[in-house]
């Protein structure tokens, strides 16, 4: 039997709206890494990976790396509500606690036709026994760093990804999240708005709701394989609007698009349970 575990989220408005904690039942779900200097970051600086949950918009990879909003202060616009404004869009986020379930409501306002990718770049503190559960057969895009783990000539020449079926696209088993093996790879589970992470007796569920936009879940499985100079372990499970890490790689169906009304609204729900 699984019983609900109330969650509470904390965030840092002054430093990109970053989620600094997601805690419940005596467990902190968000990983915090070794990289110093996060509080000294200025716009256009290189990304500093300190963990937590970063808001990536309008891209994840590419330029600017991890998007435009993680490195800027957000302003308070009401109870639990933050806003960050850029020349081409305005992002509003409100995080509430509904009987122990964390609900984050987002809204992007921009000119009709504006294209973007958004990801809740959540780095989770997980044991080597943890697994990621998603519907079997979900189309899954491997990204180029996975090419070295495949047979020679398996990667399509010039392609930004290779698509296979979850949980083992191209034969790479991705649902197991450890132990560390010196690899690091990224993948995107297409049309997959709900996933669960199970670690021992604890289970975390992430669900994304958004009408008329592509919904995915990105995975960054770094098992002490990145960066090359000083690798560490970090596991990203990232609800996403869009289907590509880099907006410049996104085809017509791979990015969110602002409709004639001038805004896109979506909701991320995060809940936890403990097995007895």
Image: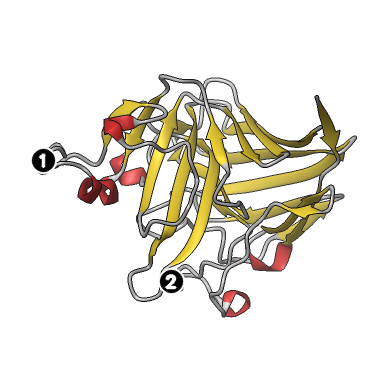
Specify which label sits upstream in the sequence, 1 or 2: 2
Q: How is the image coloured?
A: secondary structure
Q: Is residue 45 above or below residue 212?
A: below
- At 52% from the left and 27% from the top, the residue drawn is 134
* Quadrant in which residue 254 is drawn: top left
- At 73% from the left and 63% from the top, the residue drawn is 12
* Quadrant in which residue 31 is drawn: bottom right
Instruction: Point out the frontmost of discs 1 and 2.
Output: 1
| Visible residue check, residue 184 | yes
Give whichever of 214, 265 is nearer the camera: 214
As measured in the structure, the alpha-carbon distance from the residue carrying label 1 to the one carrying label 2 is 29 Å
Q: Dot 1 lies on which element?
A: loop
* Quadrant in which residue 153 is drawn: top left
- At 24% from the left and 47% from the top, the residue drawn is 149
Give whichever of 88, 78 is nearer the camera: 78
According to the picture, the residue beneath numbered tag 2 turns out to be 46
Residue 151, percent from left and from top: 15, 41
According to the picture, the residue beneath numbered tag 1 turns out to be 157
Q: Is residue 245 above or below residue 208?
A: below
- At 48% from the left and 52% from the top, the residue drawn is 179
Q: Is residue 247 above or below residue 265?
A: below
Give whichever of 148, 38 is nearer the camera: 148
Give whichever of 182, 161 is nearer the camera: 182
- Quadrant showing the N terminus: top right
Residue 51, percent from left and from top: 59, 62
């Amino acid at each position: 039997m699984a019983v609900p575990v109330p969650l509470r989220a904390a965030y840092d408005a002054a430093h990109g709206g970053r989620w600094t904690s997601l805690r419940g039942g005596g467990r902190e779900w968000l990983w915090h890494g070794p990289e110093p200097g996060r509080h000294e970051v200025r716009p256009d600086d290189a990304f500093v990976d300190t963990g937590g949950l970063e808001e990536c918009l309008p891209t994840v990879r590419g330029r600017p790396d991890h998007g435009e909003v993680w490195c800027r202060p957000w302003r308070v616009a009401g109870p639990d509500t933050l806003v960050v404004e850029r020349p081409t869009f305005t992002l509003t986020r409100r995080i509430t606690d509904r009987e122990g379930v964390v609900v984050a409501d987002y809204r992007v306002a921009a000119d009709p036709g504006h294209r973007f990718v958004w990801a809740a770049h959540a780095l989770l503190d997980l044991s080597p026994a943890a697994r990621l559960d998603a519907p079997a057969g979900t189309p899954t895009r491997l990204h180029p760093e996975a090419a070295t783990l495949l047979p020679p000539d398996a990667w399509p020449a010039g392609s930004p990804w290779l698509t296979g079926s979850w949980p083992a696209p191209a034969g790479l088993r991705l649902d197991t999240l450890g132990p560390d093996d010196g690899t690091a790879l990224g993948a995107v589970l297409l049309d997959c708005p709900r996933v669960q992470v199970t670690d021992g007796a604890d289970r975390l569920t992430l669900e994304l709701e958004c009408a008329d936009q592509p919904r995915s879940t990105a995975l960054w499985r770094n098992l002490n394989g990145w960066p090359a100079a000083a690798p560490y372990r970090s596991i990203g499970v990232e609800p996403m609007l869009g289907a590509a890490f880099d907006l410049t790689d996104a085809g017509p169906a791979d990015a969110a698009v602002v409709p004639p009304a001038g805004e896109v609204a979506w909701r991320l729900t995060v809940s936890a349970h403990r097995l007895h």
